[in-house]
Amino acid sequence: MKQRALLLVDLQNDFCAGGALAVAEGDSTVDVANVLIDWSKARGEAVVASQDWHPAHHGSFASQHGVEPFSQGELDGLPQTFWPDHCVQESEGAALHPLLNANAIDAVFHKGENPAIDSYSAFFDNGHRQKTALDVWLRHHEIIELVVMGLATDYCVKYTVLDALQLGYRVNVITDGCRGVNLHPQDSAQAFMDMAAAGATLYTLDDWRETQA
Ligand code: VGL
Ligand code: ZN
């Protein structure tokens, strides 16, 4: 495999229309993902995905604390937004979107399995205490550059990209392959700015295909 991989972040039912934590236009990212999958496969490049994968009593769930979804609090000593129950292991909501060309995915990495701490990044939990298997897998395949897209821009995409940059990967973000939660209306715009400021390069799908031809 070439030294680059496509990383699809949390393209799961619960973040799409009708899901427990639906992101506006979340479904629209799946078409972009399928185009990028074909593009990557045509070049012999790897395709990997992350999946938010919570136990039913995960500490990030508002239901566990008797508070309103989207309220703010603390979990394991870290500031935490409490979410509706979502992406519960083995549930339909946690499954990858049915229209995603999932057969083409070489490896899937779960995150958020520890009930005591949330995990936005596909690489680490929010306290950087434990690592997923993603970094080791990428290094094993000698991958040094990532093409990242998915859900949600202002949480899992953002923290995945920031960690990837810190780990030394070259990172390209496909902006129209991302949609955000936007608890505040500018959160996704701010997240893209944060990713760019940290060293990521932002492309639309069309820009990417034109410049990488
Ligand atoms: C996500 C909130 C909670 C995400 C996951 O995938 O962006 N957001 N869990
Ligand atoms: Zn989650």
Image: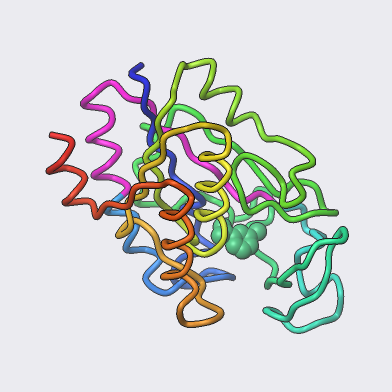
What stretch of residues is rendered in magenta?
Answer: 33-53
Q: Position of residue 119 (x, y in %)?
A: 69, 51
**If the image is split into quadrants, where does the N terminus sit?**
top left
Q: Is residue 98 above or below residue 209?
A: below
Q: Nearer the viewer, residue 183 or 114?
A: 183
Which residue is depicted at the point 47% across and 32% down?
169
Q: Is residue 117 above or below residue 145?
A: below
**If the image is split into quadrants, where does the C terminus sit?**
top left
Q: Nearer the viewer, residue 127 or 26?
A: 127
Q: Quadrant of residue 30?
A: bottom left
Here the colouring is: rainbow
* In the image, residue 52 lies in the stretch drawn in magenta: yes
Q: Is residue 131 above or below residue 141?
A: below
Q: Nearer the viewer, residue 185 or 166?
A: 166
Q: Position of residue 173 (x, y in %)?
A: 37, 49
Q: Position of residue 108 (x, y in %)?
A: 54, 35
Q: Quadrant of residue 67?
A: bottom right
Quadrant field for ligand 2: bottom right
Whether residue 200 sits left or right of residue 37 in the image: it is: right
